[in-house]
């Protein structure tokens, strides 16, 4: 594998999985080299660093690769103790945080991406799963400011990319987060206003919508 010094993140700017890694690295004030990947023409480094899935994000630390965004977040939390830990200290809280992270991946990001990449019945079914999941996630947030019981934490980092991805979800799903899950919408605004890590890591929502529009054209959906 190409020798990479220090810390590097292989990513595609629009990836919700990579965005959460950017937020976590910023929370921990880790300096790193950002390497943008072209997923249509993956670099030799990406193929060597993630030979199993060949996907971004990949974190490279002192020449060793860590794959899968949730595992990258765990790694970052364990290796860089700067700032508050992302995961709670006690086992039950950790288990709960992992549960909601898994829920976000399986229900929100999977359904949302499926909806954006399809049309007709498939898109309608994905939309239903997505909206239901957003409401369920809002139920978990409840009246708290953040998902973490002690403030912004693991689940907030995992879910943060929906703040921009929701622009696309709303456009292609014909709903608004504000109407379906107003507390979750307020949480998103709070994250951007109060966490520099989030404000700086996330791309412009309209740029993302444009990118996904081109993808849909490429897939023959528009
Ligand atoms: C998902 C990564 C992923 O889907 C994680 O890291 O959490 N479970 C993984 N990455 C996509 C880009 S974002 O949609 C990817 O790299 N796709 C390239 C490919 O499938 O060839």
Image: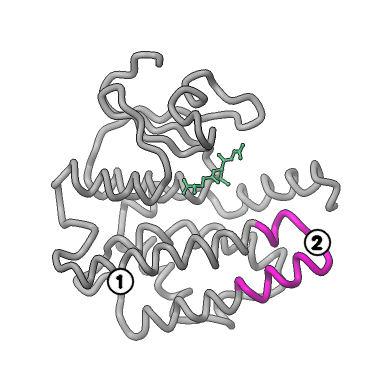
State the separation of the CA atoms marked 1 and 2. Answer: 34 Å
Magenta-span inclusion, residue 118: yes
Q: Residue at x 40, y 14 (%)?
A: 2
Q: Is residue 33 above or below residue 69?
A: above
Residue 78 higher or lower than 123, as above or below: above
The N terminus sits in image quarter: top left
**How far across and down, in percent of the image, does residue 210 sit?**
69, 48
SS state under label 1: helix
**Label 1 close to label 2 by CB (< 8 Å):** no
> Which region is colored magenta?
114-130
115 drawn magenta: yes
Query: Where is mark 2, residue-wise?
Result: 119
Judge left or right: residue 173 versus residue 185.
Answer: right
At horizontal 57% and vertical 75% (from top left) the residue drawn is 177
Instruction: Please state which of residues 220 and 126 is positioned toward the viewer in this rendering.
Output: 126
Tell me: 170 left or right of 213: left
Binning the other alpha carbons within 10 Å of mark 1 as few (below 14), some (14 to 19) or many (20 upward) gives some
Viewer-side label of 1, 2: 1
By secondary structure, the bulk of the magenta-drawn segment is best described as helix
- Return the residue at label 1: 96
Residue at horizontal 42%, vertical 35%?
Answer: 58
In this picture the colour scheme is one colour
Q: Residue at x 32, y 51 (%)?
A: 197
Q: Position of residue 65 (x, y in %)?
A: 35, 30
Could you say which disc has been placed on residue 216 in the image?
none
């Amino acid at each position: 594998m190409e020798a990479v010094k220090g810390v590097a993140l292989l990513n595609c700017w629009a990836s919700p999985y990579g965005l959460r890694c950017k937020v976590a690295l910023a929370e921990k004030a880790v300096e790193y080299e950002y390497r943008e990947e072209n997923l249509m023409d993956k670099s030799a480094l990406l193929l060597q660093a993630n030979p199993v899935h060949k996907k971004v994000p990949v974190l490279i630390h002192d020449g060793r690769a860590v794959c899968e965004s949730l595992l990258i977040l765990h790694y970052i939390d364990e290796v860089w103790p700067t700032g508050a830990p992302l995961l709670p200290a006690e086992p039950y809280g950790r288990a709960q945080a992992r549960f909601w992270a898994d829920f976000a991946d399986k229900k929100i990001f999977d359904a949302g991406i499926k909806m954006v990449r399809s049309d007709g019945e498939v898109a309608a079914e994905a939309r239903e799963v997505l909206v239901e999941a957003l409401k369920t996630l809002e139920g978990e947030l409840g009246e708290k400011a953040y998902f973490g019981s002690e403030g912004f934490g693991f689940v907030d980092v995992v879910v943060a990319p929906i703040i921009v991805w929701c622009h696309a979800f709303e456009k292609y799903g014909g709903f608004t987060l504000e109407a379906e899950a107003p507390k979750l919408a307020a949480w998103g605004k709070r994250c951007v206003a109060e966490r520099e890590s989030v404000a700086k890591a996330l791309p412009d929502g309209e740029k993302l919508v444009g990118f996904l529009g081109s993808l849909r054209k490429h897939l023959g959906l528009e």
